[in-house]
Image (tube, rainbow, N blue to C red):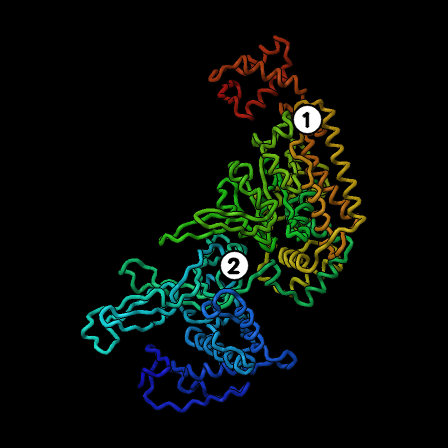
Amino acid sequence: MDFDEDRIYFSHQNLHSGERREDNTSNSRGDNSESWEDKDDDEDGYVDLDAVRRHFREFLRSYRQASGQSGYIYRERLLRMHRRTSGEESNPKKNGCSIRVELAHVGEYDSALLGLLLSRPNDVLPQFELAAKDALKTFLHDLKADSDSVGSVQILLKGNLAATPLRSIRSKHVNKLLRVPGIIISAARVRSRAHIIAIRCARCSDTTTIQALGGPFASVPLPTRCQGPNPQECGPVPYGVLSDECTFIDQQTLKLQESPESVPTGEMPRSILLAAERGLVDTAPPGTRVNILAVANLFNAASSSKAASVRTLYLRVLGMTRETTSADNTSFTPQEEEAFRLLARRPDIYNILTRSIAPSISGSYTIDIKKALTCLLFSGSRKRLPDGMRLRGDINVLLLGDPSTAKSQFLKFTTRVAPIAVYTSGKGSSAAGLTASVIRDAKGEFYLEGGAMVLADGGVVCIDEFDKMRPADRVAIHEAMEQQTISIAKAGITTVLNSRCSVLAAANPVFGRYDDLKSASENIDLMSTILSRFDLIFLVRDIRDEQRDRSICLHVMGVHIDNYKPGGATAGSGLVAASNALQPFNSGDDALLGGTGAAGSNSDSLTDTNSSASAIAENAMRIATTGVGELNVSTMKKYIQYCRAKCSPRLTEEAGDVLTSSYVKIRDDVRRRTLDSDGGEGSHSVIPITVRQLEALVRLSESLAKMRLDSDVQTQDVAEALRLFKVSTMAANQAERSTTSSSSNNSNPSSQSIMSAAIPSRDDMMRSESFLRSRLVVGMVVNRQKIIEEAAGQGYNAMVIARALAVMVMRGEVQERNQSRLIKRVK
């Protein structure tokens, strides 16, 4: 057995002692009967690499598509790449060139060649690259061009192999070609790795070269004996490296993570290291969604000899395809497209989509919130101006209000129905966790790692407990919310990452609950700089009313006893059907959100991540023909992807004129209210009405047109966008102590609740609070009834004093003890 031949033998395979037949290196296209790969003796793992090289060279020279109209594809690609690289100032011999090879073309030419590439990429891919270099030299020689300038050629693979989920990669996939989808979460700086190492003996000056074959993470051992004519005289380990004569290639280490929406509930997202070389470096910054064609390899990551047999998996990248939009990796069947187009033509498509948003959460004013979330999911149209400036099309929404009003449930539902979504909590999130950070690994290498807003690029990031974030962390997302970029300048890494995502945030007022006696600016403890970046701001109130509370109880009980179904209660079912609670709850004037944990979890049954295309088309077609019921989560998600991929509406002149006149009128109304207030308290708007709000109206109008696949924004879209803006942002901007006066008039007059009593004037409340603060010293404990009687003796209204005490208890200034008989001032 001659081990000096250009062949590969695998020691773990069974070796045959019989003689091999002569290889038939016929290169006729489509001749799968040839024996360039000895199929009968394949058990010993033998492959004739020279034959593989010749066969692939013939493929590059002679492949044409079946139609024959496109010419010789790879001949043209090689010549075009050579002309481009040879025109660069840098040395093309050093940088080389790369061409993209379609796996489908290889399989069409010869399925055996494709099978060899899939099963033994580490063995045959170097021969493919040598064959490409030989073929390019041949083409240049035929054209009488200079073929000496040809450098190395990199083969970049592209194909539609069956995807292998990242968490499914096992030892059986080692040395196999895989397609792995995911998202790049970190990227190291590009380094130079020695590909061909020049070495010289220190004694006899014998010079030779060795090739680094151990992979990007392996060290290359130098020969222990001199290879010269007299190795005995040179002693052990005589060689030294000649750095100036080595050949280097670019290398970059990346980290690939599962897409957030593909991570099973309760599981940590998996990640794996990627090794990119030459033309693949600096092609995917953090936050980029990619499909990787790579070969799974192993390297020794253990620093201790005790774990010498344990190896770590990594992927050597052979091809990378970027997903620029959420629909890039989504295909639509003809049945789905027909159903979606029919659905978009319905005049009530807006209402169908609205009632499909969190159907387990009911209430009258929740309808406007659901409409706003529908607009957020479809988004407006991104635009790039002639000067290169980008205008965002994503819509930001803030839900600000009392606890237990289903804000978090709306966020959770949005993460499930959005094609790309990341959920996080403001209390546990830092500026680096939301944007990006530079970290150092165990070897001292700096990595750039993207945060939540980078990972949600092209989708939605949901931030709960937005008010619990530190002010410095909220300032850090200013750029990401408006410019949709994140600028990093740390540890010598200066770059800009994309964060083209919508922001859906939920927050509580300053005192936990909305204080009726405070103005909007006192209740909303957020800077105007961050508030102006939200297109819609909803003020969600928990108004006390016996009838409403009873309806809420009936609805929640119906959910807990499993009587609720999307679209109404079950006929004849116990509590809900007997009281007919769901119907008045859906149509009441001031119904509260059904925001319980059970209500949110009940809607989990709507999600079917494995829904087939036929089931999605069937659901969409049924709703499109009957108009009854809701779209399930899978159909809703697919329809959102379809509309965002197929439609990009633009404003018409008529719609633009309506927007212009309406915006000017809104600004004039705000200015007039400011002047009428005489510059007193609350004279300045907590939410400034600026050009950002005008652009928000444009985005809302575009999203409404996109829902029905209309390329033009109509005047009715502008009218609905203005209505949503007025019932959300403008209503929150004008909210004062009188916002609940109408609801208190409808309350039960026999109620003994102090907070349900008629609202006194601000001056009376301020005087009552001043009296209580002057009478109560910090740390002092007094009888509650006694202090009220004392205030009444000095001319104060007893009910106003009682209400002022209740407000101070709510703020934490006063504590109640002994069943509210005693009060103690704590601050």
Between 603 and 98, the one nearer to me in the picture: 98
Task: In the rendered view, tell whether residue 336 sits above or below residue 582.
Answer: below
Q: Is residue 476 left or right of residue 335?
A: left
Q: Secondary structure at mark 2?
A: loop
Residue identified by numbered label 2? 284
> Residue 602 location in percent, x, y?
59, 49
Q: Is residue 539 left or right of residue 165?
A: right
| Comparing labels 2 and 1, the label whose residue is closer to the camera | 2
Q: Earlier in the sequence, mark 2 or mark 1?
A: 2
Q: Is residue 599 visible?
A: no
Q: Secondary structure at mark 1?
A: loop
Task: In the rendered view, tell whether residue 748 sits above or below residue 787.
Answer: below
Q: Is residue 370 left or right of residue 512?
A: right
Q: For residue 762, which quarter of the picture?
A: top right
Residue placed at 46% from the left, 72% from the top?
A: 152
Q: Which residue is outermost to the top?
A: 793
Q: Is residue 462 visible?
A: yes
Q: Please tell me how crowded label 2 is: few (under 14), some (14-19), or many (20+) other residues with Cα within 10 Å.
A: some
Task: In the rendered view, tell whether residue 793 sits above or below residue 700.
Answer: above
Between 173 and 71, the one nearer to me in the picture: 71
Q: CA distance from mark 2 to mark 1?
A: 49 Å
Residue placed at 63% from the left, 19% from the top?
A: 765
Q: Please tell me how crowded label 1 is: few (under 14), some (14-19), or many (20+) other residues with Cα within 10 Å.
A: some
> Residue 100 location in percent, x, y?
54, 71
Residue identified by numbered label 1? 683
Q: Amino acid at mark 2?
A: Ala
Between 81 and 604, the one nearer to me in the picture: 81
Q: Amino acid at mark 1?
A: Ser
